[in-house]
């Protein structure tokens, strides 16, 4: 049986809560090998939870400076690939302290259900993350790296 929609929603709810709380350890634990990411700005794989955690922690000062206070998500698409693997397109919404949406970003994730029934992200494709982040930085008056 393919990964059920409610299991995906619960999984990304936990992931979003970890992002919202700047909880790099919990976020990293939701990933499994090869922990691969591809976007216009990055291509690579992180070898361990510790590497994922460190990469996330590097981004936190900027997100705090931008005023990130909340995270919401929409599941835009779910495509079962096999009985244990689903491709999910997620739109993340980043909120300020007033609960207003500041920015959004779309990702596609390949999620696998393990023998223990737990879901893990194996691969993520950042679709518009660099553009959305640059636009938010511009709106907030921050220097956008070239």
Image (cartoon, grey):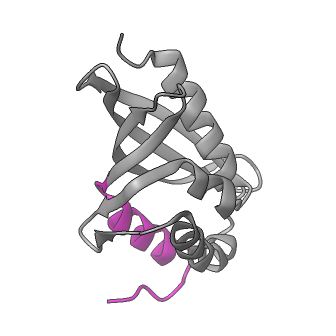
Q: Position of residue 25 (x, y in %)?
A: 67, 61
The picture places residue 80, in percent across and down from the top left corner, at 27, 22
Comparing 21 with 104, the one in front is 21
Q: Is residue 109 above or below residue 131?
A: above
* Residue at point 66%, 79% (across, down): 61
For this orientation, the residue located farthest to the top is 1
- In percent of width and height, residue 88 lies at 35, 33
In the rendering, at what x and y percent does residue 38 appear?
Answer: 27, 62
Left or right placement of residue 97 versus residue 105 in this view? right
Question: Is 21 left, or right, of 102 in this rendering?
Answer: right
Residue situated furthest front in the rendering: 115
At x 37%, y 48%, the residue is 122
Magenta-span inclusion, residue 57: no
The vertical placement of 39 against 103, above or below, is: below
Q: Residue at x 48, y 41 (%)?
A: 120
Magenta segment boundaries in residue numbering: 125-146
Which quarter of the image is occupied by the C terminus? bottom left
């Amino acid at each position: 049986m393919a990964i059920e929609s409610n299991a995906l929603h619960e999984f990304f709810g936990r992931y979003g809560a970890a992002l919202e709380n700047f909880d790099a350890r919990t976020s990293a634990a939701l990933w499994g090998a090869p922990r691969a990411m591809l976007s216009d700005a990055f291509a690579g794989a992180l070898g361990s939870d510790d590497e994922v955690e460190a990469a996330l922690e590097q981004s936190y000062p900027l997100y705090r400076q931008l005023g990130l206070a909340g995270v919401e998500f929409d599941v835009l698409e779910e495509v079962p690939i096999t009985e244990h693997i689903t491709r999910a397109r997620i739109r993340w919404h980043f909120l300020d302290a007033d609960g207003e949406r500041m920015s959004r970003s779309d990702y596609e994730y390949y999620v696998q259900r393990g023998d223990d029934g737990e879901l893990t992200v194996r691969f993520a494709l950042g679709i518009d993350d660099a553009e959305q982040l640059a636009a938010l930085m511009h709106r907030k008056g921050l220097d956008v790296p070239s």
